[in-house]
Amino acid sequence: MTDVQQTDGPVGDKLAGRVALVTGGIRGIGQAICLSLASQGATVAAGFSGNTERAQAFLAEFRERFPGQAVSVHQGNVGVGDDARRIVAEVIQQHGRLDILVNNAGITSDATVLKMTDEAWDKVISVNLSGAFYTSQAALKHMIERGSGRVINVSSIIGDTGNIGQTNYAASKSGLLGMTKSLALETAFLLRRAGKLDVHPGLTVNVVSPGVIATEMVNAIPDKIRDALYEDIPMHRFGDPAEVARVVHFLAADASAFITGQCWSVNGGMDM
């Protein structure tokens, strides 16, 4: 665990007036992303699947850190197309616009390939990959009409390296890399055709790929496996969620308008 801390309260205004939807936003990396975006002035909408108690705790913590700053939570299963589109519509209706979409929602259902069930395969692909497509499709319709926006997908080092027992997870996270590049090309093409390529601050699609980050999921790993992971990381520590979040808010900023279709790895050198 690193000693990097999430800043309390606003520290800048790079994202002032912007509205951000972060799926899987009430805990772990997603929560850190919400707080980081809010620290730069963004209005935050956090998506979650079912833990209403945790969602209320997130709201309470957010309001304590950012008193008076707009925030909302939106429940639904992004792996279901209609639900994903409803969440995006809710955010636009409640806040009047959507400038930043962070596709962070992700689940695991691990098993070796010979033991993996159809249900385990379909569930992980539907949330991690299809969910990002559904929300991006809905958000990009809104963003392309305006000529500006940011879509930032959260992949994983497993999408690059693979992992035993995680064929479904690796496929979903690797799929986000290809989807990001295609969406980046398509959005630029559509904006050019509409004569909106010069609209400030542009429309970009990028992906952030974390390595082993100190979240509840990682902290639950048995000590023996955790020790082995440490040895595989050149910086010899796990990442902090805030370190991933800082890259996300960098990509969301206006000054990053010339960065699109790129993968930003945050993994302590574990994969180079």
Image (tube, rainbow, N blue to C red):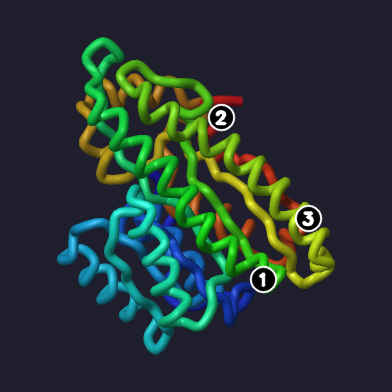
* Mark earlier in primary sequence (2, 3): 3
* Mark earlier in primary sequence (1, 3): 1
Q: Is 133 placed above or below 88 here? A: above
Can residue 265 be seen at all in this image of the molecule?
Answer: yes
The image quadrant of residue 49 is bottom left
Residue 21, given in percent of the width and then of the height, sits at: 45, 66
Tag 1, which secondary structure? helix
Q: Nearer the viewer, mark 1 or mark 3?
A: 1
Residue depicted at 58% across the width and 82% down the height: 17
Q: Nearer the viewer, mark 2 or mark 3?
A: 3
Label 1 environment density (alpha carbons within 10 Å; few <14, some 14–19, many ≥20):
few
Q: Which residue is mark 3?
A: 258
Give whichever of 27, 81 is nearer the camera.
81
Q: Is 225 placed above or below 50 here? A: above
Label 1–label 3 contact, CB within 8 A = no
Cα–Cα span, label 2 and label 3: 25 Å
Tag 3, which secondary structure? loop
Q: Which mark is residue 269?
A: 2
- Tell me the kind of residue under disc 1: Glu
Residue at the limit of the structure toward the top, as seen here: 114
Q: Which mark is residue 145?
A: 1
Tag 2, which secondary structure? loop
Residue depicted at 68% across the width and 44% down the height: 261
Cα–Cα span, label 1 and label 3: 20 Å
